[in-house]
Amino acid sequence: MNEMTIIHRVNISSKAIAITFDDGPNPKYTPELLALFAEENGKATFFMIGEQIKANPELAAAVHEQGHEIGNHTYTHPYLTQIDPAQCLDELQRTDQLIQEITGKKPQTFRPPFFDYNDKVNNIVKSFNYSMIGATNMETRDWELPGVEHIINKTIDNIGNGSVLLFHDGYGDRSQTIEAISILLPKLAAEGYQFVTVSELLQLT
């Protein structure tokens, strides 16, 4: 077994957390999130899909220019264990290249779509030297539109120093997520939490 660790939380004493968003960039919701994080002087990590970067390159550039991190979330969002290794490699490589074109540097982080991975996927991810990123608030399930209160409560229930939090800014109606984030950010900031990128969080260990 050539296992790879998926990181849901890092062991730190400081009140720093990494808030992440999957499946964008999205021309409606991503700019709303950028505005919310600017209000709190915080940074986030956006795990972007290559197809969406291709469709919205200026928006991806704006995310980078405002100091947020862009992570790799594949090119078309497939179940990686259900495609052959060459296709899997292509999914990561094409998005890696797009992110480099936008940011001028190689991405450091990766999140597998649907958290679907096995040894084959692990080996390919390792070849990129990515950190594979999970989350502590899986029960939030914001993509199912469970209600703003549910999103907030399930996040707060699973937060602590070093937590990685998962939300979505791409595909479908993300208005509940935006509203939840607009409530969570000032609340958590008032509790002393600092909002950092995933790579910054990893460097605190």
Image: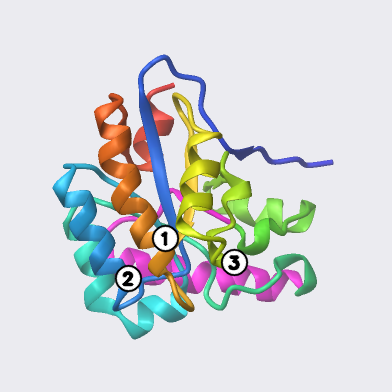
Residue pictured at 18% horizontal, 59% vertical? 35
Name the residue beneath numbered marker 1: 177
Amino acid carrying mark 2 in the image: Tyr
- Crowding around mark 3 (Cα neighbors within 10 Å: few <14, some 14 to 19, many 20+) is few
Name the residue beneath numbered marker 2: 29
In magenta stretch: residue 107: yes
Q: Is residue 75 visible?
A: yes
Residue pictured at 57% horizontal, 51% vertical? 140
**What kind of secondary structure does the magenta stretch mostly adopt?**
helix
Q: Which residue of the protein is positioned furthest toward the right in this rendering?
A: 1
201 vs 57: above or below? above
- Crowding around mark 1 (Cα neighbors within 10 Å: few <14, some 14 to 19, many 20+) is many
Image position of 143 (left or right of 200): right
Q: Is disc 2 in contact with disc 3, using a CB cutoff of under 8 Å?
A: no
Q: Secondary structure at mark 3?
A: helix
Residue pictured at 18% horizontal, 43% vertical? 40
**Region rendered in magenta:** 84-111
Q: Secondary structure at mark 2?
A: helix
Name the residue beneath numbered marker 3: 144
194 vs 57: above or below? above
Amino acid carrying mark 3 in the image: Glu
Image position of 143 (left or right of 123): left
